[in-house]
Image (cartoon, grey):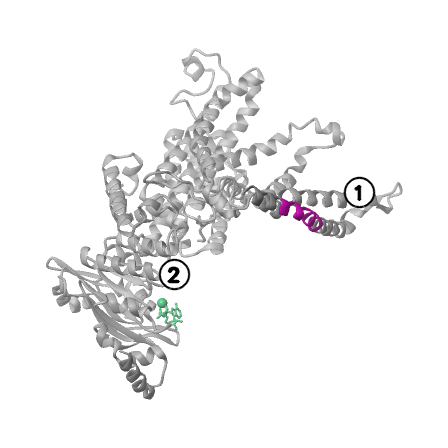
Amino acid sequence: MAVLSQSTAAGAEARVPDRFVSASKDAGFAALVTLGLCVPLVTLRTDSEEGGELILVPRLGLTAALCLAIFFARLGYLLLWGKEARAARQPTSRKEAIKTVATPRHSLTTIGLPIALGFAIAYPLLVTVINGGLSEARYWIDLGILVLTYVMLGWGLNIVVGLAGLLDLGYVAFYAIGAYSYAILSTTFHISFWVCLPIAGMLAATWGVLLGFPVLRLRGDYLAIVTLAFGEIIRLVLINWVPVTNGGAGIASIPRASFFGLPFNDDDDGFAAFFHLEFSPMHRIVFLFYLILALATLTSIVTTRLRRLPVGRAWEALREDEIACRSLGINTTTTKLSAFATGALFGGLAGSFFAVRQGFVSPESFNFLESAIILAIVVLGGMGSQIGVVIAAAVMIAGPEMLRNLGFLKAIFGENFDPSEYRLLIFGLAMVVMMIWRPRGLVSTREPTVFLKERKSISSDLVKEGHG
Amino acid sequence: MRGETLLRVEHLTMRFGGLVAVNDLSFTAKAGDITALIGPNGAGKTTVFNCITGFYKPSEGRVALAHGGEAAFAAIEEATEKGARTLSVGDGAIHLLERMPDYIVTQHARVARTFQNIRLFSGMTVLENLLVAQHNPLMLASGYSVLGILGLSSYTTRQREAVELAKAWLERIGLTERADDPAGDLPYGAQRRLEIARAMCTKPILLCLDEPAAGLNPRESLELNTLLRDIRDRDETSLLLIEHDMTVVMEISDHVVVLDYGVKIADGSPEQVKNDPKVIGAYLGVEDEEVAAVEAEVEGRA
Ligand SMILES: Nc1ncnc2c1ncn2[C@@H]1O[C@H](COP(=O)(O)OP(=O)(O)OP(=O)(O)O)[C@@H](O)[C@H]1O
Ligand SMILES: [Mg+2]
């Protein structure tokens, strides 16, 4: 046995120089490609001289530095993490390894949500203590509200995209319908927020069904395009239907939410007076924070329950194989419609919250970029995973905000450096890195909805993404 | 019930543009039988299945299924004229399958099927696959999800029953140990058995199997034969079976229908069909004159 292991170790050593040579060849090629790319892009820089004349400034040093950096980065990568390096470290194939070692992620998905909820509940207190005062913490609580709104939207869209496997690029339409439902109902009919909230949800769900009907026979790319168009149509209607929506100017002075009838003002019948507190505008902000937290938690609970019900299992089965579903007597039309409607319902609720928080809605808030961000949150988080969506929303929404706080970078890059200008660049880079590193999202394993003896996570290479 | 006609396929024709995949096919299948549909590649067998299970709408012809005994066929003309999908007759009913969408065929007419290329929900566990098959009764029990979300106990009881049924089937196909594994991780033979069990969980009276023995090794093939006979004898389910493997067909089927180029060329007991010169000709792809010679050879060997 000892002899055997010795001889294999010797074999592995003998292969190391081979690996080094092939890796440096590969790295050399990468450096060459870099050089080719650098010549038009980096090596020559146009600059204007004093007189306004254009001159070419050669930057050979920079080019060389870039090529060398790429060479060593590639070499290091190949030697440390390359396919052969991994093969030398563990003889089993990668696929097998993934399938059997699925347990650590399992704990993340089961305990992740309660931890996130606990953190969210304590969050306002936490930032108040850190910032030394409620008013000082306003920025942070506002940011928390924003992130939670996107968490809720992500969870809503996750039902359609992650569970049922229907690619919806127009999800923001339901968000808009919810927001405008509340805006119009409250400004013209003076209905309170608590009554409007379910109405707005229902209206959005109804529109989900109405949109669902014509597009259900479409699959894949076609479905994506039609839902994209639907999102745009809703936005155009909002702009052009001036008598109802007030067009591009939007609807302003939307009534604010009250604390079960107690308004947030410094009157005698206000919230502060009732609870014998000193009036502070922050009460309303904290209330909004807990309101969206409650709405998001509701979304999560309902989704988790639905997944364990026959309808949720049918959604996932639909994502896996629609024809097999039909052969088992499942009406795929109503199943898809129910997914659309449920997703739209939560989008509508989130929209109402948006309107009550801003006090102002305009079509500008509901453009395609919103849909794209929500979809990106779902895809980055891992389709069908709830905790993945939370992490992705936090990173995607709070991340760019964090750039504002990187003032110390000015010391390195000079006074004119503004990190938030690089927002989209970093965003794009992060996307590319994610797609290479974890193409199926942060949490890509699937948790079974029912089990006999033992709950085993299912590896992402077996779970389908759906195509229609 | 057993021995009475269950399914009647009449003048079934299916055209794809200029191609006639099934041409004026008529045959019957009896309750409690294993009826085999055989024929060379491209003969139109899968197309017949698709017409029976509602995946294709036939160009012409009628496919009628009787619930509660063959007496129901008495109402076949009445149902056809009325334009009805289903007509109740006494305790039973007649179902005109060619008028039904695919999921209704399974849900109301209780005809289940498997596919030539296995179609499991590979990212769901074995148990989940069997529960999806019980979707309709469970959906009803969950009050179309409304009561289910509130966590009502009536649903929990019903769900437990569904798991019990799934467990019973896992026992029968020998996959109890793998209940919590993803279906896509099972070996090929087990996937075939699981697909059959999944179809059986819809509680069908007619089960259509498209080449269940394809790709199985001899031992698995034997196990499959036992399973199919077991279904025929223990469950209230008759079988319609497409098969290439003649030994399987000869061993387990009670009645064989042979298709070639969409046309029925033979219909009878396995013994009759085996010795039919047309069938031998179709399978070996020889001219009619040579059939006699081949037949003689076969007889000589036997
Ligand atoms: N959807 C379709 N569109 C066009 N042609 C089709 C379609 N389905 C089947 N066909 C054609 O009908 C003929 C019969 O096909 P079918 O699949 O029924 O054969 P089969 O007997 O099941 O063959 P195999 O043993 O290879 O499964 C073939 O020529 C096939 O190309
Ligand atoms: Mg076939």
Q: Secondary structure at mark 2?
A: loop
Q: Nearer the viewer, residue B155 or A367?
A: B155
* Residue A20 in view (yes/no): yes
Residue A99, horizontal then vertical, whole percent: 46, 45
Q: Are marks 1 and 2 on the same chain?
A: no
Label 2 resides on the chain identified as B
Q: Amino acid at mark 2?
A: Asn
Q: Quadrant of ligand 2?
A: bottom left
Depth-wise, is mark 1 or mark 2 nearer the camera? 2
Q: Secondary structure at mark 1?
A: helix
**What is the chief secondary structure element of the magenta stretch?**
helix
Asked if the residues shown at circle 1 and circle 2 are in contact, with their CB atoms under 8 angstroms apart, the answer is: no
Quadrant, the N terminus of chain A:
top right
Identify the residue at horizontal 73%, vertical 29% (top origin).
A410
- Quarter of image, res B226: bottom left
* Residue A59 in view (yes/no): no
Residue A456, horizontal then vertical, whole percent: 40, 40
Span highlighted in magenta in the image: A10-23
Q: Which residue is mark 1?
A: A62
Identify the residue at horizontal 24%, vertical 62% (top origin).
B239
User: Crowdedness of circle 1 by 10 Å Cα count: few (<14), some, many (20+)?
Assistant: few
- Quarter of image, res A75: top right
Q: Which residue is mark 2?
A: B117
Residue A374, horizontal then vertical, whole percent: 51, 41
Please say if A123 is above or below B226: above
Q: Amino acid at mark 1?
A: Leu
Label 1 resides on the chain identified as A
Which residue is farthest left?
B90
User: Crowdedness of circle 2 by 10 Å Cα count: few (<14), some, many (20+)?
Assistant: few
Identify the residue at horizontal 39%, vertical 32% (top origin).
A298
- Quarter of image, res A417: top right
